Image (tube, rainbow, N blue to C red):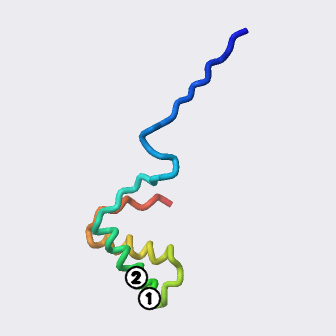
Amino acid sequence: MATAKKSSHRSTSRSPSKKSSGRKYSEKAQSKVGKVMREYKSGKLKSGRGGKVKSRKQAIAIGISEARRSGAKVPRKKAA
């Protein structure tokens, strides 16, 4: 009877609870998004048409877009 040897290979480089998306945003981009989120939370953030932004995702998208316009290092948009 041949017994199969089980391999107990465990990666020690990273703990399993921490997950990284692999996207690298610059400090400038992070501060820009932070500023926009503060505006959003205080109810003062407006979209391009002038209406209030009600979605958190939309607020983040506006922050990333502004950071991109100001020349910050932001990952490229996904192709639709």
Tell me whether circle 2 and circle 1 mark residues in contact (CB < 8 Å). yes
For the point 42% across and 61% down, the residue is 77
The reply, left or right, for residue 5 in relation to residue 27 is right
For the point 38% across and 59% down, the residue is 76
**Residue type of the residue flagged with mark 1:** Ser
Find residue 68 and report its horizontal and vertical position in percent: 32, 69
The N terminus - image quarter: top right
For the point 40% across and 82% down, the residue is 38
**Residue type of the residue flagged with mark 2:** Arg
For the point 40% across and 56% down, the residue is 23
Report the residue marked by disc 1.
Answer: 42
Residue situated furthest right in the rendering: 1
Figure check: 74 above or below 46: above
Q: CA distance from mark 2 to mark 1?
A: 6 Å
Judge by depth and name the residue closer to the eye, 36 or 14. Answer: 14
Report the residue marked by disc 2.
Answer: 38
Judge by depth and name the residue closer to the eye, 64 or 8. Answer: 8
